[in-house]
Image: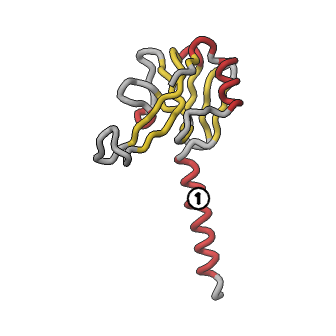
Amino acid sequence: MRWWPLLLAVFGVLVLGGLALRVVATRLRVDSEGVQLNAGRRLRLRWDQVTEVRVRRIRFSRNAEDDAPSVNVSYCLVMRPVPGLATPRHLTDAQGRVRVWELGSTEVMPLELELALSRFAGDRWRRDV
């Protein structure tokens, strides 16, 4: 009977950890039909719905000037959907690009992802940053 608080705490950590993983995209699939995120944000874009795919720099600042050292720079795989396509607001920036996959603080893309985009995205894929 004295172990129930520990069991309850472990159960709580497992439940909260599972919920946290649902908020963040954990699986990206790139194939001949398009791009799909699941086990998280659940986004599906077909290639005929996309005009451009590229890696973009994203700046996250908290009351700082652009060239201040406290500004965090991250890189993200983004897609520009065809005009008029409804996209999730929380993934769409002011220019209408959909943030698909966070690459972190480096613009280097995993080789598998770059090969898949080269193969399936065709001329929509642009390597410049």
Q: Badge 1 local density, few (<14 within 10 Å), some, or many (20+)?
A: few
Whether 77 is drawn above or below 51: the answer is: below
Q: Name the one closer to the observer, 9 or 110.
A: 110
Q: Quadrant of the N terminus?
A: bottom right
Q: Name the one closer to the observer, 76 or 127.
A: 127
**Quarter location, residue 114:** top right
Task: Say which residue label 1 marks.
Answer: 17
Residue under the point 59% across and 61% down: 15
Give SS at disc 1: helix
Q: Residue 99 in the image: x percent, y percent? A: 49, 32
Residue under the point 54% across and 54% down: 20
Residue type, numbered disc 1 = Gly
> Is residue 49 toward the left or the right of residue 109 in the image?
left
Residue under the point 63% across and 88% down: 2
Whether 48 is drawn above or below 70: the answer is: above
Residue at the top extreme, as displayed: 123
Q: Residue 113 in the image: x percent, y percent? A: 66, 29
